[in-house]
Amino acid sequence: MLKEMLDFMNENAGGFQAIFAIAIFLATIIYVVINSFMHREMVKTREREESPIISIRIDREFEATYSLIIENISNVSAYNLHFTKAPNLKHVGTTITTRELGIIKYPIKYLAPRQVYSTIFLDLKTLMKEFQYKEVEFEIKYEDKNGKEFTLPFYLNISALHYTLIPIKLDSYK
């Protein structure tokens, strides 16, 4: 039985070579296609890792006073961060508007990883009558180290802040 199988393979060696060559060729093509997909994903991941990520948020400071906080939450620096859109609201306890705040009016040339800028921004007691159901829009633009520009829009519904609870610490939940 074994001798007959070996004789058959020897007589048809060219055919077997052709079949195995085609199989190796197909396996190589599949390998190249899979590697090209993996390469694309690695490039996307590297671009994400090398891109700054900026966070804009509003945090409560006092009973009805909120701060605008800008933070670089990535591991790379951001450059030339500036507001292209910002609401023109009355600033807390002054005669200026929010567009005149330094953090909004002037560009931030360099924002290191994990660096935070913060300024007192809103006083709901002052704004609720005028802007109770208004959504305000922010937009910032910034760049990575290579000059690639990013745009981040941020929308805030002021009425969502109205009647928010003041967080308290309970001794029993230490």
Image (cartoon, rainbow, N blue to C red):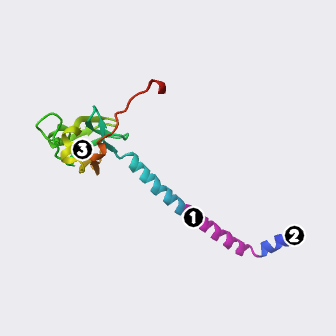
Q: Which residue is mark 3?
A: 81
Image quadrant in which you'd find residue 30: bottom right
Q: Nearer the viewer, mark 2 or mark 3?
A: 3
> Mostly what secondary structure, the magenta segment?
helix
Residue at the spot x=34%, y=45% of the render? Answer: 53
Q: Which comes sooner in the sequence, label 2 or label 3?
A: 2
Say what secondary structure mark 2 lies in. Answer: helix
Residue 45 higher or lower than 76, as above or below: below
Residue 25 higher or lower than 104, as above or below: below
As drawn, the label of residue 30 is 1
Say what secondary structure mark 1 lies in. Answer: helix
**In this view of the protein, which residue sits in the foreground, 47 or 33?**
47
Q: Nearer the viewer, mark 1 or mark 2?
A: 1
Image quadrant in which you'd find residue 171: top left
Amino acid at pointer 2? Lys
**In this view of the protein, which residue sits in the foreground, 128 or 104?**
128
Task: Give the x, y percent position of residue 33.
Answer: 52, 63
